Image (tube, grey):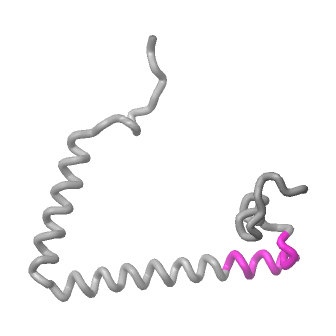
Amino acid sequence: MKENRSGRGQFNLSGLAGFLAFCIILGVLISFHSRNIDRVSAFVFLGFRFATGIMLMWMIWSSRLRGGAKGRSMPRWYRKWFLGEDDQSPR
C-alpha cells in the first residue's frame, strides 16, 4: 500500500547534521564570552518583545474599532480561553 505522506515528518540526516553544527558553533562562540553575541541576542529578544507588544496592541485596538469591546469580534476559541470557559458551558 502506498502512503500519501509528505516528506516533512521523515527523518533527515542532513538537517540533523546542520542543527548539530549550529549548536556546536554557537556553543563555542558563547564559551568565548563574546560581547557581540550578547548584544545580538539582546537585540533579537527585545525586537521579539516589541513586535509581540505591537501585535497585541493592534489586535485590541482593531477589535475595539470594529465594536468588539464586548468580545464579539474575537474568535470563539479565544473567548473561551480568555474567559476560562470549558466545553460544557452553554452557548
Left or right of 90: which side holds 10? left
Which residue is farthest top? 1
Left or right of 90: which side holds 8? left
Query: Residue 68: horizontal and vertical position, in percent?
Result: 84, 74
Query: Residue 57: horizontal and vertical position, in percent?
Result: 66, 82
Residue at left 28%, top 82%? 40
Nearer-the-camera pick, 41 or 91 = 91
Query: Residue 76: horizontal and vertical position, in percent?
Result: 79, 59
Q: Quadrant location of residue 67?
A: bottom right
Question: Is residue 51 a member of the stretch shown in magenta?
Answer: no
Q: Tell me the quadrant of the picture where the N terminus can be found.
A: top left
Q: Quadrant location of residue 52?
A: bottom right
Question: Is residue 70 a member of the stretch shown in magenta?
Answer: yes
Residue at left 78%, top 75%? 63
Query: Residue 31: horizontal and vertical position, in percent?
Result: 11, 77
Nearer-the-camera pick, 39 or 33 = 33
Residue at left 20%, top 85%? 36
Q: Tell me the quadrant of the picture where the C terminus can be found.
A: bottom right
**Residue 19 vertical placement versus 64 (above, below):** above
Left or right of 44: which side holds 33? left
Residue at left 77%, top 63%? 85
How would you classify the magenta stretch by its main secondary structure?
helix
Bounds of the magenta segment? 58-71
